Amino acid sequence: MKRKSAWLVLSCLMALSLVMASCAAAEVEEEEVVTPGEEEVAPVEEEELAAGPEMVRDSLGRLVEKPRYGGTVTTIWSDPIGTDIFDPVVSTRSVGTAVQTYGRLGTADWSRGPTGTNEFPFSTSYIPDGFLTGDLAESWEIVDLRTIIYHLRKGVRWHNVPPVNGRELTADDVVYSSERARADPQHVGYQSPDMPEDKRDQTIAIDKYTVKFIAGEESTRQLHGNMNWLYIMPREIVEEYGDLNDWRHQCGTGPFMLVDCVPASSVTWIRNPNYHLFDPFFPENRLPYVDKFEALVIPDESTRLAALRTHKVERMGVPWDKVESMKKTSPELMWREILPDASAVLITRTDIEPFSDKRVRQALSLAIDQPAILREYYQGSGYILVWPVMPSFVTHYTPLEELPELSRKLYEHHPDLARQLLAEAGYPNGFKTEVAVSSVATRWIDVMSIVKEYLAEVGVDMEINVMEPSTWVSVLFAKNFAGMIYCDWANNAIDDALGWIHGGDVGADGSHSQYAFGNIIDPVAQETYETLKVTLDPVEQERIRKEECVREIDLCWEIPLPTASSFVFWMPWIKGYSGEMGVGPDWYENDGIFRYVWIDQDLKYAMTGIR
């Protein structure tokens, strides 16, 4: 299935990277369906409380607190998105709720994140294929560049609500969901009816528990698309009600069952007692641990921060400029600094002078004192060099200190070298230019004002053109800004940087991606993109990606600027959690982590008077 997904939040693009994944198969016996409310959790004895927490060894041999069931976890959404449309095929609107209710073929391998072996930070919205594990699929095999076979878990049950009534999930459900998604223009995997048959994806049920996906074109991206973006839906609900938009008609295989929604106010789920996944650190423990999960919609930032300070919510992201205040006023909270979720980038018009000359682009970067911006504007809370991929992608990210000397200097401050390159390019006295900035983000305007001063020192007179958001977006996608445009990009993998953004993805008619904002046409990017699409060896994939990253840094098509870190704070009674940001593939899905955590209700009661 051909998967191209991009989302724009302040023009953030999400990229998709491919690394091979595998998962060992295991037989699961069918189990009796439990109706919510039937199961009981043993009470905690008083003598156990006096003796302190019970310590046990987990699957990694670590001595940790024994997880306990029960309690309520509350989180905050800043945007009401997902509280009016719940149908998972509307993937840009329902992702916040779908991750709790529905299952996918794959999910993030929680055991390899910070709470486990710490092989991958799980700090961005994108999870590479190499760090995926089975959800509804127990295992899979990549037959060739067009064919993947998935072996479903046996005994997976739909939520025990009518008209589905807890029946077992089968391969026919996967086929139905796949076909429904491909037919809906609102889904990221939509395929037009006008598409030639030989280019269309196919989903075939081989038997009750085996599904074959046949892609319409060769690509190493198929695994990620199938496992990340396809939620599995029950046919019965759609046939009875027409769609899955109403919150009252939700039925999935996910960790929680939706029981209430007040649009733009709150969404509430209860524990699915028949959930098929178990705690990777305690394989005998069925997930989730908490009895109830609720999300409160609070658009106002100051109100959200107050809710965190007063222990009304269990976990929340805090902007970098509010972090020190939160630490001082709420020292009891746990926190973690997170790698940036987007890249602050100056995009240049590479198809016009003077930006068509690499020396000019490099000169602009050399003129900007990046360490000073990070130190003085972002108060040290951020990163330099988060483009063309973010540092969380350790397999093909090259740290600043390991770059060739000139590439390293691009992120320092060398005005003399900048003047030299400008002179060599034919601009000894500099030139005038313009940068388009959206008025929606005060930070963007602040940073561009700082950049303007640095460029003036080498003779470049940059006018800051502040635009209304709609105008700015129009100019961005029309690719007709005067010189440069500034925005945040959520770019996690080189595949999409060189494909969509750097002109590598060329259509049959010779057209380039709508996201190639800098009008970049680069034969090497095109060749590399095509090579990656047909390279199955994961080691070779990463070698190609790593080399391409270094090449593109030197070309300086975009000028990345320091990017602020993200910070997550959480209550000390949240256990089995180490600051992970999500289970992918979208930021709205970061609440997917609550299927793994447990609540120390005694500690919560001691701090709040509430269990």
Image: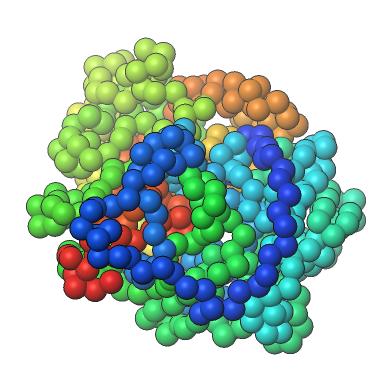
Q: Is residue 308 above or below residue 453?
A: below
| Residue found at x 80% / y 46% | 149
Position of the C terminus, as image quadrant, is: bottom left
What is the quadrant of residue 220 in the picture?
top right
Q: Position of residue 602 (x, y in %)?
A: 25, 64
Q: Nearer the viewer, residue 518 or 376?
A: 376
Q: Where's residue 601, x and y in %?
A: 29, 65
Please, which residue is most extreme toward the top here? 405
- 474 is higher (above) or lower (below) than 20: below
What residue occupies the far front of the structure in this picture?
A: 47
Q: Is there any visible trace of residue 282 in the rendered image?
A: yes
Apparent side of residue 420 relative to residue 386 in the rendered image (left or right)? left
What is the tally of numbered marks visible in this picture?
A: 0
Observer-nearest of 352 and 158: 158
Look at 40% across and 28% down and name the residue there: 361
Q: Quadrant of residue 604?
A: bottom left
Q: Residue furthest left?
A: 328
Q: Answer whether residue 342 is visible to the viewer in this image.
A: no
The relative height of residue 437 versus residue 95 in the rendered view (above or below) is above
Colouring style: rainbow
Residue 368 coordinates in the image, percent (x, y): 26, 30
Say which residue appears at 36% left-offset and 69% top-offset.
43
Q: Residue at x 88, y 57 (%)?
A: 207
Considering depth in this image, is 328 or 29 the residue closer to the camera?
Answer: 29
Relative to 506, is 467 on the left or the right? left
